[in-house]
Image (cartoon, grey):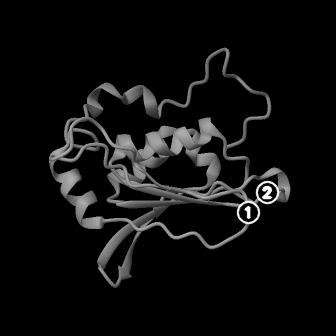
Amino acid sequence: MTHGNEFLVCDLDTEGGNVKVGAMICYDREFPESARILMLKGAEVILVPNACPMEINRLSQLRARAYENMTAIATCNYPAPYSNCNGHSSAFDGVAYLPDMPGSRDTCVLEAVEQEGIYLAELDMYMIREYRSREVHGNSYRRPELYKQLISEEKNAPFIRADFRK
């Protein structure tokens, strides 16, 4: 049980063509930078194995990561009542707006129930790619020159923890 040293993206050869896939663990979901790095490395889909209760806030994190990075995010969680887990595996496609639809749409493609099972979510990669080519989220209008503090390792109160490990 050791942490990794980087976020990787690989090519997945599918029946519908090549898809760039990244992965992060459930703890990485807690930090927006994890999904952002995967998006910057080209991920179109981010897979997240999960081992904790999926409740409205954790599902909201995944929805937000998909939205802000214009990537699909799919998570697979242990079913209830295994190891303090509750199922609710999910998939979000990250496509909030469609040209022919007024307002925004729900990016949730799937939210499974608590029981063990096989749940399939279909992701429209053409729609995701077209959306990424025209919307403002993702990498188009970022201003990294303003984000230098994000790479600082300095910790300030109230976020100093005696048990911090690198």
Name which of mark 2 and mark 1 comes first in the sequence.
2
Q: Nearer the viewer, residue 28 or 146?
A: 28
Q: With respect to residue 37, does 149 lie above or below?
A: above
Q: With respect to residue 30, does 16 lie above or below?
A: below
- Which label is found at residue 80? 2
Specify the amino acid type for callout 2.
Ala
Q: With respect to residue 97, does 3 lie above or below?
A: below
Identity of the residue drawn at 49% across and 46% down: 34
Q: Quadrant of residue 150?
A: top left
Give the secondary structure at mark 2. Answer: loop
The residue furthest bottom is 15
Identity of the residue drawn at 64% across and 54% down: 88
Q: With respect to residue 15, does 54 lie above or below?
A: above
Residue that numbered label 1 is attached to: 115
Specify the amino acid type for callout 1.
Gln
Identity of the residue drawn at 36% across and 82% down: 13
- Quadrant housing the N terminus: bottom right
Tags 2 and 1 in contact by the CB under 8 Å rule? yes
Is 80 on the left or on the right of 41, as rendered? right
Residue 77 in the image: x percent, y percent?
A: 67, 59
Is 122 on the left or on the right of 25, as rendered? left
Q: CA distance from mark 2 to mark 1?
A: 6 Å
Circle 2 crowding by C-alpha within 10 Å: few under 14, some 14–19, many from 20: some
